[in-house]
Structure formats: C-alpha cells, structure tokens
Amino acid sequence: MRRKITEKLLDWKQNRQGESALLIEGARRVGKSFIVEAFAREAYRSYILIDFNSASEDIRRLFRDYRGDLDMLFMYLSSFTNTKLYPRESLIIFDEVQFCPDARAAIKYLVADRRYDYIETGSLVSIRQNVQGILIPSEEERLEMQPMDFEEFLWACGNE
C-alpha cells in the first residue's frame, strides 16, 4: 500500500544514517506497524520486528539486563527471532514500544552503537503516559502518522 509517509522514512534512512532512532506516533489503527514492516522489507537486508504488545518476558528482560552489553543483546535478539543482523543494513522495529519502557530507554545506547537502525511505533496517548522512570532519548526523532488522506485512499483503490 502506498503512503506518503514512506518518503519520509526513506529520507530518514538516507540522511540520518544511524544518528537517530525514529519514533512513529499516531492514533490506533492508522497503519503504523504495516507501513514500517513494508518499509523494512523494501529498504533493508534484514529486520527484526518486536511487538511489545505480545512479546515474551524473556524478550522484554533483554533490554533491562543487557543494555550495557549490546553484543549479547544483539546475539539474543538474533537468536530469538532467527534473523541474521548486518551492520548498517538491518533495522530493528520496536512496535508498540509504550509497553516496554526499558526498550525505549535503551534507544540512547543502541543509537550510540550505530550498528543498526531503529524505528519505534506507538499510539499517541500511550507513548505520553508510559514514560515514568525513563529518560526520553534525545537521539529520537518523532514523526506523526495520520490516517489515510483522500489521495492515499484513491491510490489504494487503484486510481492514480
């Protein structure tokens, strides 16, 4: 599905080159997860999608226990998801990041490492509510995703 936000994602990938994570906020059910995963398939050699709405406690604990040992964190993530990670060619997606504040807090260290790119998604209300006890990373750029506009609707219907 063609969405205007895809151009902004490409611009972020090309111009930031790992200098920042991207937080995509928006109302529920506007297609954040869908568009980010489609972008990952097209623009990266590999990607890992972690949906914190349904992630196991083992995955969540990695971001608390291995924040200081990123080699172990990446090894476990790669193993749990059966996905090979390639430096500067892989994307790690934190879907519904508001459900795992430890992962959001780890963004500062992950971006500083510069091995991979990171996109976080979350709903506007929940992102703002679930920040107690964490330092909001300055290495995070924000992008708000809106519902489809009329032009995007026409594209989805095959009307160019």
Image: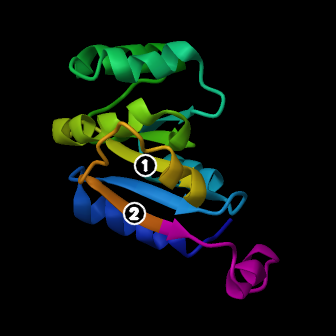
> Could you tell which of marks 1 and 2 lies nearer the N-terminus?
1
Q: Secondary structure at mark 1?
A: strand
**Residue type pointed to by label 1:** Ile
> Percent x, y for residue 103?
40, 33
Vertical placement of 22 versus 81: above or below? below
Vertical placement of 81 versus 133: above or below? above
Residue that numbered label 1 is attached to: 119
135 horizontally vs 121: left or right: left
Q: CA distance from mark 1 to mark 2?
A: 10 Å
Q: Secondary structure at mark 2?
A: strand
Which residue is depicted at the point 56% across and 60% down?
A: 124
Which residue is depicted at the point 60% across and 25% down?
A: 55
Q: Residue 142 shows which numbered tag? A: 2
Give whichever of 152, 110 is nearer the camera.
110
Label pair 1/2, CB-CB below 8 angstroms = no
Q: Nearer the viewer, mark 1 or mark 2?
A: 2
72 horizontally vs 43: left or right: left
**Residue type pointed to by label 2:** Arg
Q: Quadrant for residue 1, please give it.
A: bottom right
Does residue 129 belong to the magenta stretch?
no
